[in-house]
Image (spheres, rainbow, N blue to C red):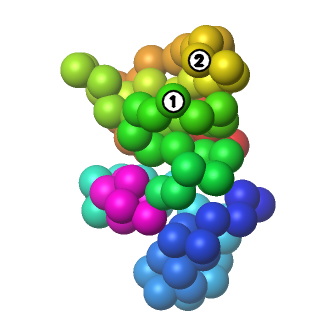
Amino acid sequence: MIRIDTLDRFIASRLKGDESRFLELFEKQEVFEALKAAGRASDWYHFEPKTFDGQYLVEAHDGFEVYLQDRGSRTSVRHFSTLRAAAQAMFG
């Protein structure tokens, strides 16, 4: 399972520690907003566009995008209409 402190707290408080229900957290925007607010430059996972290397899940004009960024180049860009589908692609 992915280890991100913010997600771990939501899993504990909202899902009673049941990691198998992880994707339920992405049915609403609240968790996504918390992940954006808690992001640090040193993180591998990012939730808003930045210049750092890593895996990204970001809002797009008509949904969400998941991609890998390395030295400023985006690769493996995938588009999703829902946050849950994007989270599944990123973490699943």
**Disc 1 element:** loop
In the image, residue 50 above or below residue 46: above
Is 90 displayed left or right of 63 in the figure?
Answer: right
In the image, residue 40 above or below residue 81: below
Residue 66 seen in the current view: yes
* Residue type pointed to by label 1: Thr
Q: What residue appears at the point 58 percent right and 34 percent down from the top-left corner?
A: 52
Evaluate if marks 2 and 1 touch, with contact meaning CB atoms under 8 Å apart. yes
Secondary structure mainly formed by the magenta segment? helix
Q: Name the residue under label 1.
A: 51
In the image, residue 41 above or below residue 77: below
N-terminal label among 2 and 1: 1
Q: Quadrant of the N terminus?
A: bottom right
Q: In which quarter of the image is the C terminus?
A: top right
Q: Position of residue 64 (x, y in %)?
A: 38, 29
Is 2 displayed left or right of 63 in the figure?
Answer: right
Q: Name the residue under label 2.
A: 72
Q: Is 6 included in the stretch rendered in magenta? A: no
In the image, residue 4 above or below residue 54: below
Q: Position of residue 73 (x, y in %)?
A: 61, 12
Q: What residue appears at the point 33 percent right and 33 percent down from the top-left corner?
A: 59
Residue range highlighted in magenta: 31-38
Q: How far apart are marks 2 and 1 (CA)?
A: 6 Å
Label 2 Cα crowd, 10 Å radius (few <14 / some 14-19 / many 20+):
few
**Disc 2 element:** loop
Looking at this rendering, what residue extends furthest in the right direction?
1
Q: Position of residue 57 (x, y in %)?
A: 49, 36
